[in-house]
Amino acid sequence: MVRLAAFDMDGTLLLPDHQLGQQTLASLHALHQRGIHLTLATGRHLLEMQILRQKMILPAWLITGNGTRIHDQQGNLLLAHDLPPQVAEEVIHSHWETRASMHVFNDSGWFTDRPQPALLAAHQMSGFHYQLRDLKTLPAHQVTKICFVDHHPSLCQLKTQLDAVLGEQANICFSALDCLEVLPKNCNKGSALARLCDHLSLTLAECMAFGDAMNDREMLAQAGHGFIMGNAMAQLKAALPHLPVLGHCETQAVSHYLNHWLATPCLAYSPEC
């Protein structure tokens, strides 16, 4: 029996233009009417997700910052997990052999040291935006995560550098092909979902989860019913070959599956073409 549904946002719940399709929104409200807990599990910032949740008029739990924060439907904090200050200090102040832009997040917002107007297209629905700042002046003890944005091959080289320096001190993963994130050790959407289930007296077996990137891997692997998007990273499909693959986010494939599940949960599902 499914009692909670967790959804990644970009590449999963949202269309390629980072907007929410009306069919998807209707399906989410139908789930809510069925008494299923809704959870939006995303790398996006809490400040942005509060805006989006209000626009969607959706009573959803929020897992933000790729598991660094959990909030209830009223905005109350249930979990906060920050990077150790020495790790944040190391990442921000070291010289990395890369042209990737660096982005630092804390509870106050999103900070970067040079204009990145192209990145704002993904945030048009909320109006959320970065703040320009000398990153070395930010307090290291308040950092939730650090992101690097560049082409995938360049980020793969950077990941090798970060792994060599940080070792087991942090969780380094791709949240998209062009986005590499440094997160607190053992912090991911899966561990956050497990914590939320404990809070709600649920088991992970009672959860369904949907995602498309490597930052969704633990959540999809641990949920009783994990689903991978057709447009997902090849690495994710290879890491979880036993999980079913749905259609593309551009066809609102999550809604397609949910409508099938709500109407005929006992029948096998075939992704739309």
Image (cartoon, helix red, strand yellow):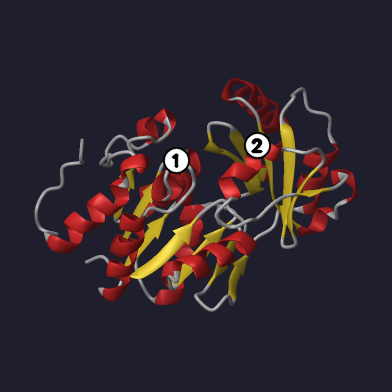
Q: Position of residue 189 (x, y in %)?
A: 49, 54
**Residue at the image point whose x is 35% and y is 54% from the top:** 209
Q: Quadrant of the N terminus?
A: bottom left
Mark 2 and mark 1 lie on one chain; the one further toward the N terminus is 1
Q: Position of residue 169 (x, y in %)?
A: 68, 44
**Residue at the image point whose x is 43% and y is 32% from the top:** 233
Q: In this image, 203 relative to 175: left or right?
A: left
Q: In this image, 88 relative to 65: left or right?
A: right
Looking at the rendered structure, the kind of residue marked 2 is Ala
All told, the count of numbered labels is 2
Looking at the rendered structure, the kind of residue marked 1 is Pro
Q: In this image, 197 relative to 268: left or right?
A: right
> Considering only vertical position in the picture, is 236 above or below 226?
above
> How dense is the environment of label 1, judged by Cα within 10 Å: few (below 14), some, or many (20 and up)?
some
**Image mark for residue 16:** 1
SS class, disc 1:
loop
Q: Is residue 35 visible?
A: no
> Considering only vertical position in the picture, is 10 above or below 80?
above
Q: Nearer the viewer, residue 125 or 197?
A: 125
SS class, disc 2:
helix
Residue at the farthest left position: 267
Q: Quadrant of the C terminus?
A: top left
Q: Is residue 148 visible?
A: yes
**Image mark for residue 218:** none
Q: Position of residue 114 (x, y in %)?
A: 81, 38
Which image quadrant is residue 163 in? Answer: top right
Q: Position of residue 191 (x, y in %)?
A: 49, 57
Which image quadrant is residue 235 in? Answer: top left
Could you tell me if the residues under marks 2 and 1 are in contact, i.e. CB atoms within 8 Å? no
How far is the residue under mark 2 from the one under mark 1? 15 Å
Q: Nearer the viewer, residue 12 or 180?
A: 12
Name the residue beneath numbered marker 2. Answer: 118
